[in-house]
Image (tube, helix red, strand yellow):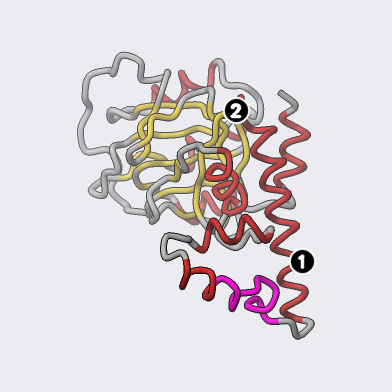
Amino acid sequence: MDHDGLRQRFATLTTAHLADACIRAGLPVRCAPAPTRAVVPGSRLFGPAVPARHVGSVDVFLEAFENAPGGGVLVVDNGGRLDESCVGDLVVLEARAAGLSGVVIWGLHRDTADIRAIGLPVFSLGSLPTGPLSLGPRVDGGLAEAIVGTWRIGPSDLVLGDDDGVLFVPLARAGELFTLAEGIRDTERRQADRIRGGEPLREQLRFGEFLAARETNPSLTFRAYLRSVGGAIEE
């Protein structure tokens, strides 16, 4: 897998393009919960997942860094807890020193000002001054997968993040998904240029024809119609 090539291609894509590509490819769209946002707006995230289940101690992150691939993204599972933070500036600094490209937390962070200064992209559910409140037993498989929302994320997943949030896609299908996403991006750009040029989207998509066709075929969906005319507005 050419990660560098995909990283360069992602620079011209968004997570929305790739989410639509997942739908086009018949794959589930696996997003981190909606409140997951970058500590620094405008941050972008790309890299294979480096999972770690937090149980109250930083050692699980240090262990995850031991064999983490360069450019990986630490994916922290803290059960979505909102009563404690589980990642601070030292962990983010160590992630950068280990060659990782970012951090995603299903939970909270702290040391916000320091994390901003470090510059490594960090996405979380928010911040809280309180650190870990208790220490639980080590979790079997705690470095094999992390749960983020309803999804199980492991090293076979690619992590993508931008201002819309965080998306996980299978590494084995990444090339295919990026190609689909690029096609969707190009179609949407052409449509946007034509709208700016004075041609409304309804005209481009012959929306009146869709309404007429739906009169005779009530089961016709707009998505099916879009596919017939080459539109990409929904997916």
- Percent position (x, y) of residue 110? 39, 49
Q: Is residue 210 above or below residue 172?
A: below
Identify the disc placed on residue 171: 2
Is there a contact, CB below 8 Å, between mark 1 and mark 2?
no
Q: Secondary structure at mark 1?
A: helix
Verify whether residue 2 appears in magenta.
no
Q: Residue at x 75, y 81 (%)?
A: 196
Q: Nearer the viewer, residue 235 or 34?
A: 235
- Percent position (x, y) of residue 85? 33, 44
Verify whether residue 203 appears in magenta.
yes
> Which stretch appears magenta?
200-210
CA gap, disc 1 and disc 2: 29 Å
Q: Nearer the viewer, residue 21 or 48?
A: 21
- Percent position (x, y) of residue 6? 73, 36
Q: Residue at x 35, y 27 (%)?
A: 53
Q: Locate residue 213 relative to residue 205 in the image: left or right.
A: left
Q: Earlier in the sequence, mark 1 or mark 2?
A: 2
Q: Amino acid at mark 1?
A: Arg
